[in-house]
Image (spheres, rainbow, N blue to C red):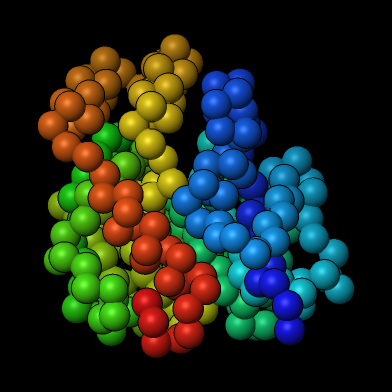
């Protein structure tokens, strides 16, 4: 017994802005999830950096981040990540997937991912939470606002996986498998400034159009993400007992 130990499986290259302001996306997740007396490591899986098999048992949980890559792709590192996630699932390790992480976890569980038929979802969106026992001790409202930035989604999950949140835009905003896996399509870790920076970068690459920006900026000006509620939810899932989230 000792300090709790977690790892971030980083699936995206850090931008200079996020590196300078937050210490990279690893720092963004640490800011959301870490508590004193814990150990947090990072594995840059998108660059081929993975934990060794004999290290896995020493971790209490893993967080799988967002990415510019497609979760339905077959890049070597993505296939290696799928194998790792299946192994961690069999070990019943806590796994929290965010955006791409949510999608790749869904794929590892036997689900299907792909482009959303309704296109990009960028901005702050209200999602509906189910009455799942997963939320019973957190006293959460029936809706939570979260930052979204994705054009892919989980399209289908096996019957053993429970969908626990949805929105007007996306049918599977959150899911859980057993008591050890949870996927979140949105970005509970993002702040508004990170979202604005991403919108600017993506627009300059011509990957999105002006109308996407207009919709996103309208949502940013009119609402805020429920960041503290998301922090409680994610930390409770990762660190609580099986009935505490």
**Which residue occupies the foreground of this view, 87 or 30?**
30
- Asked whether, in this view, residue 174 is left or right of residue 103, the answer is left
Q: Which percent across, then down, holds residue 56? A: 76, 72
* Residue 197 can be seen in this image: yes
The residue drawn where x is 33% and y is 42% is 148
Q: Is residue 56 above or below residue 118?
A: below
Q: Quadrant of the C terminus?
A: bottom left
Q: Which percent across, then down, holds residue 205? A: 47, 16
Rendering quarter of residue 120: top left
The residue drawn where x is 38% and y is 36% is 191
The residue drawn where x is 65% and y is 83% is 90
Q: Which percent across, then down, holds residue 102? A: 46, 58
**Which residue occupies the foreground of this view, 228 or 217?**
228
- The number of discs equals 0
Q: Quadrant of the N terminus?
A: bottom right
Q: Which percent across, then down, holds residue 218? A: 16, 26
Q: Residue furthest front?
A: 36
The residue drawn where x is 51% and y is 56% is 33
Q: Is residue 132 above or below residue 97?
A: below
* Residue 155 can be seen in this image: no
**Which residue occupies the foreground of this view, 31 or 8?**
31
Rendering quarter of residue 214: top left
Rendering quarter of residue 210: top left
């Amino acid at each position: 017994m000792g300090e709790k130990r977690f790892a971030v499986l980083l699936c995206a290259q850090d931008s200079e802005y996020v590196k300078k302001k937050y210490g990279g996306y690893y720092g963004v997740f640490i800011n959301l999830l870490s508590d004193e007396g814990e150990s947090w490591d990072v594995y840059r899986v998108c660059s081929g950096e993975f934990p060794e098999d004999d290290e896995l048992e020493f971790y209490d949980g893993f967080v799988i981040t967002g990415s510019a890559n497609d979760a339905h792709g077959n890049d070597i590192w993505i296939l290696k990540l799928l194998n790792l996630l299946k192994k961690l699932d069999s070990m019943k390790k806590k796994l929290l997937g965010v955006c791409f992480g949510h999608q790749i976890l869904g794929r590892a569980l036997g689900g299907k991912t792909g482009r959303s038929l309704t296109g990009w979802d960028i901005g702050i969106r209200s999602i509906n939470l189910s009455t799942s026992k997963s939320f019973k001790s957190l006293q959460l409202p029936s809706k939570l606002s979260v930052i979204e930035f994705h054009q892919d989604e989980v399209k289908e999950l096996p019957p053993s996986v429970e969908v626990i949140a949805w929105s007007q835009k996306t049918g599977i905003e959150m899911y859980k498998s057993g008591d050890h896996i949870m996927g979140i399509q949105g970005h509970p870790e993002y702040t508004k400034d990170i979202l604005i920076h991403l919108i600017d970068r993506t627009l300059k690459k011509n990957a999105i159009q002006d109308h996407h920006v207009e919709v996103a900026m309208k949502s940013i000006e009119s609402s805020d993400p429920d960041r503290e509620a998301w922090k409680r939810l994610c930390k409770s899932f990762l660190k609580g007992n099986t009935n505490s989230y």
